Image: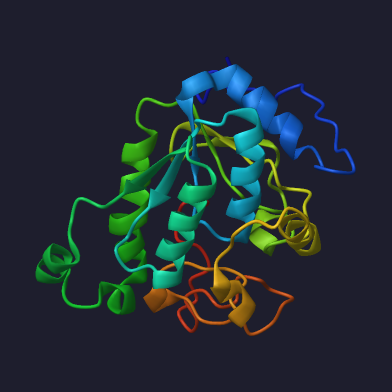
């Protein structure tokens, strides 16, 4: 089994086929390799909807972890409920941080996402994912190379030093058009905020409509110089 501890560049040639661009084959290999020791950390954005549908074809009862920061858009929570109804066998885990918003405010001050967004992400996203990945060997992410300059070198299989894990990224060759074409073709439920200028959707306080479709993540942490929550750095 390929793990963080025994990592070496995998000599696996996944076929980048026309329909799935390698994604389905990567998922089949991943669940065969790791079984129940792999989870999908999903934000329930549009890429997540595609991956959930593909995962359901391979492992209908797969574990999907949502980092529930308590400050997501109501549309995101509504989308999760619709996904649960469409894929009943999936084990969707709503993973909350150890600190409530009230406890966080008492310890760090009100609206930490404004005064120190990195600390807020560390408390409400990074630490909970560390906890969610405890006891697992690998996790799945919806990163695509097209999303941003920092993601252009992402591979199907990646050594993740932050979480001491193998990070599996099945959608690296998918374009924004590929994603939407798939969702439309299969009539999948998705977050309606995507239709309101939000290509990338995170927590409500730190997400605005994108300035430009040339940078699909330009609506995240606007004006702060921050480009990632820390999960993929």
Which residue shows up at 29% across the image and 78% down it? 115
Residue 2 appears in view: no
- In this view, the residue in front, 126 or 67, is 67
Q: Number of marks in the image?
A: 0
Is 112 drawn above or below residue 141 in the view shown? below
- In this view, the residue in front, 8 or 126, is 126
- In this view, the residue in front, 9 or 128, is 128
| Location of residue 75 by image quarter | bottom left
Which residue shows up at 32% across the image and 73% down it? 113
Q: What x and y, as percent, mark residue 149?
A: 69, 62
Which residue shows up at 48% across the image and 71% down it? 226
Q: As drawn, is 106 to the left or to the right of 18?
A: left
Q: What x and y, as percent, mark residue 171?
A: 71, 47
The N terminus is located in which quarter?
top right
Q: As drawn, is 95 to the left or to the right of 99?
A: right
Q: What x and y, as percent, mark residue 19?
A: 85, 43
Is 79 drawn above or below residue 231 in the view shown? below
Residue 48 appears in view: yes
Q: What x and y, as percent, mark residue 98?
A: 20, 50
Which residue shows up at 66% across the image and 50% down it? 50
């Amino acid at each position: 089994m390929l793990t963080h501890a025994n990592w070496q560049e995998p000599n696996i040639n996944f076929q980048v086929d026309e329909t799935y661009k390698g994604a389905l084959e990567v998922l089949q290999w991943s669940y065969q390799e790791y079984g129940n020791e792999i989870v999908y950390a999903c934000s329930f954005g549009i890429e997540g909807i595609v991956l959930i549908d593909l995962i359901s074809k391979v492992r209908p009862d797969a574990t999907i972890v949502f980092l529930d920061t308590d400050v997501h858009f109501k549309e995101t929570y509504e989308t999760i409920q619709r996904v649960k109804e469409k894929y009943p066998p999936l084990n969707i885990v709503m993973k909350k941080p150890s600190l409530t918003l009230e406890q966080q405010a008492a310890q760090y001050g009100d609206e930490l996402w404004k005064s120190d967004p990195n600390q807020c992400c560390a408390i409400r996203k990074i630490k909970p994912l560390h906890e969610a990945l405890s006891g697992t060997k690998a996790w799945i992410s919806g990163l695509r190379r097209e999303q941003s300059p920092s993601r252009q070198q992402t591979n199907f299989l990646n050594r993740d030093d932050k979480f001491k894990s193998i990070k599996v990224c099945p959608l690296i060759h998918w374009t924004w058009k590929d994603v939407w074409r798939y969702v439309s073709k299969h009539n999948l439920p998705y977050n309606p905020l995507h239709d309101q200028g939000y290509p990338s959707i995170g927590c409500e306080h730190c997400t605005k409509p994108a300035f430009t479709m040339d940078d699909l993540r330009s609506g995240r942490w606007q004006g702060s110089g921050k480009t990632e929550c820390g999960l993929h750095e």
